[in-house]
Amino acid sequence: MKNIFLLYITFFILIGCNENNSPIDIPQPTGAILDPWVGGTTEPNQVWIDLDMQKMTVTPRIAWDFGFYSGKEFRVILNTSISMAAGKLETSDINAVTEADVASMKPLVAVATFQPNNIQYVDDVKGNYLERTAIDEISANDKDNKVYLINMGNYMYTGNSTDLKISGDSRGWKKIRILRNGTNGYRIQYANISDTTFKEYTVNKDTAYNFNFLSLDNGPVSIQPTKNNWDLCFTVFVNEINGSGTYIYSDFVITNTMDHVGAYQVLTSEINYEAFTKVNVDPSKFIYDDQRVIGANWRNTFGGAKTYTDRFYILKDHLGTLYKIRFLKLTNSENLRGYPQFEYDVLN
């Protein structure tokens, strides 16, 4: 038996050591045509796309409430894809907050109210979350961490699929307070507004991800792929309209600026998609500090939903790989939104 065992070992060693010691070829990224499954007209899903692997990760929009930053800073983001919003109170005693304390704030802490100053109740729409979030950076001094009134947004719309609605009934309100949990995590206290005691979760930082996500109903949840493994996301998005505050957009595309993904737009009046090659890339045009470069700019909803054919996008991922991207479809054969399709090619 020992001889047989030694024979197996020798066999695998010989296979593992070829005479040229040749390196293993790693497949290079190629292009593809992808159909992100946002889920139809109600767009219940967020779709995270890794271009070099041609991989799409689909997660329900309603699956998470808060995202906790995994880097050295202590920042927390809201799930604005379901219209969540947050307003700071003056107290740090969560148990003391009553309905009377927040009654006047409730009409203000909301999205799409067409009030210019309601932008303060959502995170930075450009995605510069280390500079500004609706919830202040979590302080090392517990006394500095105030209670927040949280508009929990809306459930998914469950009515007729042709109604073109993306928001259902209200999910109500919570009060929360977030503290640091040592140097590598968070503690979130939460309760219904009228409750006099709170519940608590702890969230640890996993630096493989941009954010670690939490659902108040279900605890920690997996949402985004690891930070190096997504470039784009199709999602419902709360954006800003200059002078009118926040507004809810369907069919929105964000880029992973948290992992140094950059992008810019090219008009076909300058050069068409087929003719564009690596030599045409202008490094000075890449935008790394605004996740909305593609945003809603790829589609038109006036006079019938359709994609713009006069533009495409150049994207540079965290590895420096360059892609050109153009959008082919916004609707299905019945002209219903929520069925996007796009094409991309690697610029070698």
Image (cartoon, rainbow, N blue to C red):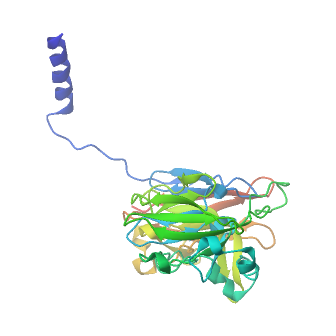
Relative to residue 283, is residue 306 drawn left or right?
A: right
Answer with the quarter of the image where residue 302 lies.
Answer: bottom right
Which is more toward the observer, 270 or 220? 220
Q: How many marks?
A: 0
In the rendered image, the quadrant that contains the N terminus is top left
Name the residue: 80% across, 54% down. 158
Where residue 40 appears, as percent x and y from the top left, is 73, 54
Q: Please say whether residue 304 is visible from this viewpoint.
A: yes
Answer with the quarter of the image where residue 70 lies.
Answer: bottom left
Where residue 142 appears, as percent x and y from the top left, is 46, 75
Which is more toward the observer, 290 or 267? 290
Which is more toward the observer, 258 or 104? 104
Where residue 267 appears, as percent x and y from the top left, is 58, 76
- Residue at the farthest bottom position: 243
Name the residue: 66% across, 67% down. 196
Is 52 rendered above or below residue 90? above
Relative to residue 247, is residue 95 drawn left or right?
A: left
Relative to residue 180, is residue 166 drawn left or right?
A: right
Relative to residue 4, is residue 165 drawn left or right?
A: right
Q: Please say whether residue 287 is visible from this viewpoint.
A: no
Where residue 150 appears, as percent x and y from the top left, is 66, 71
In the rendered image, the quadrant that contains the C terminus is bottom left
Name the residue: 53% across, 58% down. 201
- Residue at the farthest top position: 1
